[in-house]
Amino acid sequence: MSFNPKTIIEPFRIKSVEPIRQTTREEREVALARASFNLFKLPARDVLIDLLTDSGTGAMSSAQWAGMMRGDESYAGADSFYRFENSVRGITGLRHVIPTHQGRAAERILFGTMLKPGDIVPNNTHFDTTRANVEACGATALDIPIAEARQPGTVHPFKGSMDLEQLDRVLTTSRDKVPLVMMTVTNNSGGGQPVSLENLRAVSRRCREARVPLFLDACRFAENSWFIREREDGYHDKSPREIAGMMFAEVDGATMSAKKDGMANIGGFLAMQDDELARRCRDNLILTEGFPTYGGLAGYDLEAIAVGLEEALDEDYLRYRIRTVAYLADRLRQVGIAMVEPPGGHALYLDARAMLPHIPVLEYPAVALSCALYLEGGIRSVEIGSLMFGRQPDGTEKPAAMELVRLAFPRRVYTQSHVDYLAEAIIYVNERRDRLRGLRIRSEPPALRHFTAELEPIGGTLLA
Ligand SMILES: Cc1ncc(COP(=O)(O)O)c(C=O)c1O
């Protein structure tokens, strides 16, 4: 019998380290007030474990750094572009590959090229920048996830999937207003939940029948591939790369933030099959991103992404990555902490509405919880709830579908002892949850308010 370990280890060793700084609770109290209870405004040096986002925060591999050294900085037609294009084409099969400085630039270019006022874009769930870019064109961003997606405690293997009946309805009643359908894998704003291949194929079939292009928001395509392999019948013996190929085979194009499963600190792309659409997108790209073979990136960034996309599909890496989040969820579940079930790929989402029923939703329970995690444990997380989504285009405020605190894991950055510390801190805050108070907004900008809004605890203190 051979050794069959239960422990899934980090599949890398550490060549370079970056110190993180311990602070006292008193120091964090001052920092929190100075940041107006908005964790985006905290200096990173005041944060011990930074789970604000998994976007662009990962550790690059030695192979990526080596790739960067051969970055070709030619303005046009750099070797680095062709290596980047090869890598993207090899994985996606999409003909036209247009680099952008990050995902939202790909969104702006795509929507700016395809949408007009009054249009409707169905998506399982729009990410905030995706929604903002759709709305900036005067169009409506329509979220149509399956019903289970809005029930945090309900376990479903593919909670990221799209509701086919709702898609049918919009394609039947408003076909002429739908220039494209989007599918976000994994569904970040819906809890980092995967989409099944079965669902993606069903959406794709409907889009083909209605002659509407289907685009993937492919930020976490590798994690989605892993979930398909683990949870969907018929794919257990397929490699993540093969499954990714099957996903991309169903779509006409993709937007991508390479800051996620591109394993890079910056970058993105827009890719598609249609020649004429690609030509128009490239014309649009030149206005703000640069020449179409660099799209706002340095040659060395293109190299990092070309290598990173392949590394994101490595089985050992994906096993460790998905297990990290599941391990934290196991620890929290043992003490009954409410979260989105099952845990997502890149992040764990605490259910603040369930944990803090005494805080009304428009007093932002998820903001209160994320501030408390910082105050007690030096942990930075992000609210995905009514602060992020509550302000409507007409200026009114409406509660979001869920009040979540997202703990997003940078790729290859933290080890198991960091996760053990996290579990301890979250459990500590949970034990004091009755003392937590809601917040009110002191000032906010007209769009994407969660990045810069200033808040204050109601009654003057976060923990009574
Ligand atoms: C699902 C999804 N789409 C789009 C984006 C936007 O990408 P970027 O931050 O690179 O502009 C993100 C970023 O977090 C995302 O999670």
Image (cartoon, grey):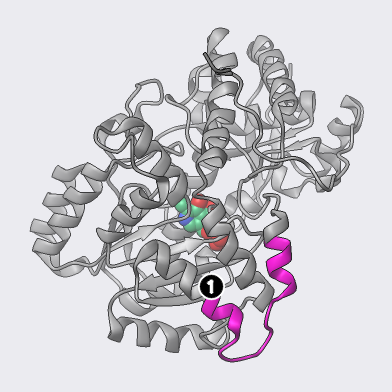
- The image shows residue 395 at horizontal and vertical percentages of 45, 54
The outermost residue toward the front is 1
Tell whether position 75 is magenta: yes
Q: Is residue 358 visible?
A: no
Residue at (60% x, 22% y) in the render: 328
Is residue 34 toward the left or the right of residue 292 in the image?
right
Q: Is mark 1 within 8 Å of ligand 1?
A: no
Residue at (60% x, 86% y) in the render: 78
Residue at (46% x, 61% y) in the render: 132
Depth check, front residue: 391 or 230: 230
Is residue 171 toward the left or the right of residue 360 in the image?
left
Rendered-image quadrant of the C terminus: top right
Give the residue at mark 1: 84
- The image shows residue 463 at horizontal and vertical percentages of 73, 19
Depth check, front residue: 19 or 332: 19
Name the quadrant containing residue 4: top right
Is residue 417 toward the left or the right of residue 153 in the image?
right
Name the quadrant containing residue 348: top right
Depth check, front residue: 231 or 43: 231
The disc labelled 1 sits on which kind of residue?
Phe
- The image shows residue 438 at horizontal and vertical percentages of 62, 27
Residue at (58% x, 81% y) in the render: 294
Which residues lie in the magenta part? 64-83
Residue neighbourhood size for the residue with mark 1, other residues' Cα within 10 Å, grouped as few (<14), some (14–19), many (≥20): many
Depth check, front residue: 350 or 388: 350
Q: Is residue 126 visible?
A: yes
Is residue 313 toward the left or the right of residue 65 in the image?
left
Tell whether position 168 is magenta: no
- The image shows residue 422 at horizontal and vertical percentages of 70, 24
Q: How many labels were placed on the picture?
A: 1
Q: Secondary structure at mark 1?
A: helix
